[in-house]
Image: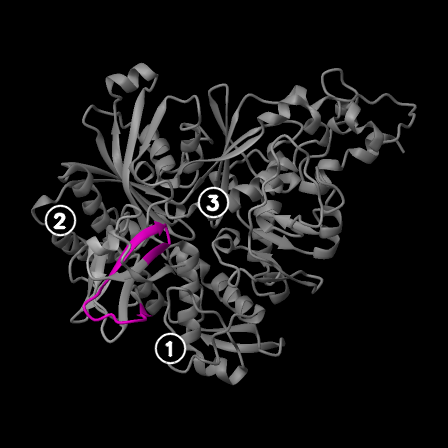
Amino acid sequence: VSISQVWDNLDYLTTRLPKIDVLRFSDVDQGMWEFYVPEALKHKYQKITSEQFYRERNPALDIQHANVAIDFGTSSTVVAIRQNGRDELLRIGMQAKDFHKDELTDQQYENPTILEFIDLQSFLKDWKSEAYRPLVNWDNIHCAHEARASLRNHGSNSHVVSSIFARLKQWALRDEKQAQVRIRDQKKHEYQLDALHELNPVKGQSIELNNNYPEIDPIEIYAWFLGMNINWRARGIFLNYYLTFPVEYPNDVKAKILASFRRGLQRSLPESLIYDERFTEFSVDELASEPAAFAAAALQRLEIEPVDGGVSYAVFDFGGGTTDFDYGFYRTPTDDEYDEGWDHVIEHFGSSGDKFLGGENLLENLAYLVFQANSSECRKKNISFTKPLDATAFAGSELLIAQTQAAYTNTTLMMSKLRPLWEKGELDLSSEGLEKFQLIDKNGELVDCNIEIKQVDLIAFLEQRIQSGLKEFFIALRKAFMEHAKKMPDVVHILLAGNSSRSRIVLGLLGRLEDERSQVLHELLLSELAEIFGDEFPELEIHLPLDADPSNPYAATAKTGVALGLLRLCPGETLKVVNHATLANTDSPFQYFVGAFRRDQFQTAIQRGQNYDEWVELGRPLNGVFVMGYTTSSKAAIENSLKRGEIVLSERSIRLSGHTQGQKVFAKVISPNQIEICTATSLSELQNDLSSNIQILDFK
């Protein structure tokens, strides 16, 4: 058998990229990276003789002078490359036959952030066999498009559902206890994931798979698949990668994700490249926030030109996991900035968001509502399910809500059934609204269940929840411009980002649809906006979510805009970004409103975006206890708008020691999710170190 016949399946086996052409093995302008052995690696390989000639190729010859932008999203990830002034989007996890199709869709560039574990033990054996480009078998693990197709085509098969890990980004946010998720592959082998931790490769050095190396890190594996597709032999090798993150992600979480991407992307490079001096150029860095990157792409595609005073804009980035808000000005550079080489400037401030308003979170809530409405059937059949983080337990739910693999699988099965309601606005139901499901009981057995789905109630929930999210967006908009510019602009361009912003409910609320129900929703939102803005109601220029351009497959859309916008912000580009949050603090902005209660009304003392290390009085303790309230809801910016007990408002009873009569509780921000509190009689005593009851409170 010729060597070319053995090796031609190399890329197809691991990632389902096209098989290697025969000419690649011998053509004077091509050759194989795998056949090139630098002096430092010659001890590792044995030379063999062959009757046929095969050409080696130094991978350093294929290094491209280009930046790679990665928008690592909750539901999908977009990879964009800028080379010679032109942008390109990549498709990841496609089947080889898809590369030969003439028809391309913009959805193909939205690579699902998902892994499917078919044979975990076989995969891990291959994964740990060598550090660089290990010869894993695609038949043991799928990613992206093919993994999502498996979920959607076999969404009623509990064995398939339990093998699919679709919450990589959400898992990264969890602490040590919450992150202990169990994966079960389709061979019924189980593996428990430990929490994500920061393990950076040493710059310029080879990765060593020793005992300290994570056995399985889903984000590293996903990044490796991205890297194998980016650094494909028909495309070349790339060394400079940039990631963007949601506004509220704290530095420690971003550092862990970046470390996983550094390992995964580095492991996708040919091993011989590690010994070339140019390998020191390899970098994976954070660059800008997601909404700022989207604004950079959207303003360009909408042909909105900067002006001296600044064009006012607001980004409503409605994604799969969260919704980010961002506000700013798109302006011409000052004389000094122009002399430095900048052509235009995005100046943004007041970044905030709704961390539970996301397409996947809404689906999880819909599934929870269906199970709640069918609680008697669940009790009878011994069925459990999960509770979304932003939902409340209902009466009698103690034995129904669980954090088990069976409960998670049941919730995922229900979400799969309800997905068309979210994505298309309706479900295919029987006339009685009854659906038969095979769910997993607490003994791990499949049980037939009759589940009633009340579509009208679910749509009403979606309308109320999205209306609430938009209200918070406009409250935060007013607060951002009033604090930064001291007045409301005459016109604000509303930029809708994220695929969830295409929802008919969103467009109806914003007055962009003309059907009767949409008009009712729009009138409801207008009445709330009148209360928010009063006499300072700006003109709102609503821009529809960016659609694909048939003449340009790489044009920015509502989803791909973040990655393409990030390319405009890479080092060397002439668009400057001024982020006022990072100017004030080294970490991400504080994400909560914190305060106390008077007459059961929440009184805000610490605002979202509060500067770090500034002591603020929260209130007075009573009988040695201080009841503190906190929320991420923008409604807290309006006085007396939140009542004690509302679902968006959390509280904590803090027990204080010693004699607290006459003392006050003070707090200061120390991280995006933490405050430090203490008691003192006055701010001056506190500043003279005369304080007690010092505690650090974590809001994760």
The residue drawn where x is 24% and y is 17% is: 335
Image-based side of 506 in relation to 19, left or right:
left
Residue found farthest to the left? 535
Please name the predominant secondary structure of the magenta segment in the image.
strand
Q: Quadrant of the C terminus?
A: bottom left
- Lower position in the chain sequence, tag 3 or tag 2: 3
- Where is residue 313 shown, x and y percent of the image? 25, 37
Q: Is residue 629 above or below residue 570?
A: below
- Where is residue 140 shown, x and y percent of the image? 71, 52
Query: Magenta span has 644?
Result: no
Q: Is residue 67 above or below residue 93?
A: above
Quote the CA–CA distance across marks 1 and 2.
36 Å
Magenta segment boundaries in residue numbering: 652-676
The residue drawn where x is 23% and y is 54% is: 616
Per the image, the residue denoted by label 1 is: 394
Per the image, the residue denoted by label 2 is: 533
Work out whether residue 339 or residue 680 is closer to the camera in this orientation and state it. Answer: 680
Per the image, the residue denoted by label 3 is: 254
Q: Quadrant of residue 673?
A: bottom left
10 Å crowding of disc 2: few (<14), some (14-19), many (20+)? some
Secondary structure at badge 1 equals loop
Q: Is residue 159 above or below residue 623?
A: above
- Where is residue 357 shown, x and y percent of the image? 36, 56
Work out whether residue 181 or residue 547 is closer to the camera in this orientation and state it. Answer: 181
- Where is residue 584 shown, x and y percent of the image? 30, 39
